[in-house]
Image (tube, rainbow, N blue to C red):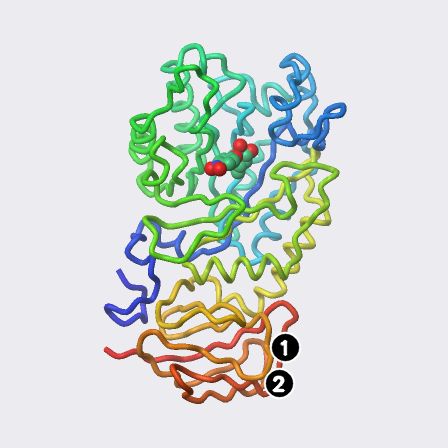
Amino acid sequence: PSPAGAAPGDNYVADDALSSSRTRWFDEARFGMFIHFGTYAMYKGQYNACREVEWIKRQCNIPWSEYEAKAATFNPASFDANAIVQLAKQAGQKYIVITAKHHDGFAMWPTAVNRWNLRDHSGFSRDLLRELKTAATANGIKLGFYYSIWDWHDPDFVGNFPAYVTKMKAQLQELVTGYDPAVLWFDGEWAETNPTNPWSAQNGEDLERFVHGISPQVVINNRVGKRRAVDGDFGTPEQALAGSPPSIQLQESCMTINNTWGYAAWDTNFKSPTTMVRDLATLTSNGANLLLNIGPTDTGAVTAGQADGLRGIGTWMAVNGAAITGAGHTGLVTQPAWGRVTRKGNKLYLIVNSWAGTLHLSRRSPFTVTGARVLGSTSPVTVRAAGDGYDFLPGGGTTNAIATVIEADITTPA
Ligand code: JFZ
């Protein structure tokens, strides 16, 4: 299926064939917010001399009795779903994926399956996932859940795997029927703590069938079965940029805004808005999404360092978001050294990182440029046929310190 405005048979988005009416919103969203939030935030990234984050229980050998006692005092009173959704929205993010359950097994919603959850174990009466769902829906943002198949807390994961799977399905039933998530982002299918390593491709396929039996439109990532590469709706390169098409499925790179997924007080190595926007441009030009992670503190607050980065991206997106949202890969051009080119219907977006004189665009397939403008600027752009493509001559010069976008109108042969 081609999006409105795209000529039949053109290569609007090379991953078009990979998307369907069910996954179309995901393929157009391009940018989402990942949130790693759980009781591990209470350690702020450190246990005695041991530095770890969402893996702290396991990597720092914290006894369960101690971990549970601390979790009992978890009080994320500063979690502000509306503020988080506004932060995502102004950054140009179209969906949010939050950890409903990470490897420590702690459920962030009031599950009836066990008491190892925010309400029953910590006595926190609010349902943060419900609040996030309400705020997201009110703002046109989709909400998804990360759910770890690997569970350190439930002894049945190792001791009685079929019993564990039954409980896992009961939790997923609660999440899907109770919160109608747009995405389920599974993880931990690779766990090898069970000597028999029970999770199989069959388990993954069974899980997908189970979820889609409840709600067919849920978009599922590929960390669901051992055959990761072909399972689910989209691939999940981690801390790496998805490559350019062709790919066997939709792609979403998940990356941290600093170095860690959960909250660590010592991790202030925040990426600059420039770095993140350029990653987003590269991914969009590759037909892939960016899921950019933040980790709220133990009180549920988003730190200034994380919020500032998202605001910086938002300032750029407010002017240039058309080059990202709904845009994708184009096979019409060779990607230039001066930046990245994305396409949406009959427009090309030239995302210019460094603007030194004439910008040459090499054509790989026929098209004609019929007009061009700089987004957020009145500077004229001169376009002329040159060599194997076009030269763009900016009237003004670089207008945006992060990346200046030229929007070009094109026609392609019928
Ligand atoms: C997992 C988690 O263990 C981690 O805590 C975080 O939630 C992250 C998003 O996902 O870590 C992984 C998962 C997959 C790979 C590496 C780390 N992998 O495929 O290389």
Question: Would residue 99 be seen by someone viewing this image from the given angle?
Answer: no
Going by the numbered disc 1, the residue's amino acid type is: Thr
**In what element is the residue under mark 2?**
loop
- 341 and 143: which one is in front? 341
For residue 100, above or below residue 251: above
Q: Check disc 2 and report the residue beneath it.
A: 396
Which of the image's four quarters has the C terminus? bottom left
For residue 314, above or below residue 390: above
Q: Check disc 1 and report the residue beneath it.
A: 399
Report x, y in % for residue 43. 71, 28
Graded by Cα atoms within 10 Å as few (under 14), some (14 to 19) or many (20 or more), the crowding at tag 2 reads: few
The residue positioned 70% from the left and 22% from the top of the image is 73
- The image shows a total of numbered marks equal to 2
Graded by Cα atoms within 10 Å as few (under 14), some (14 to 19) or many (20 or more), the crowding at tag 1 reads: some
Q: Residue 353 carries which label?
A: none
Going by the numbered disc 2, the residue's amino acid type is: Gly
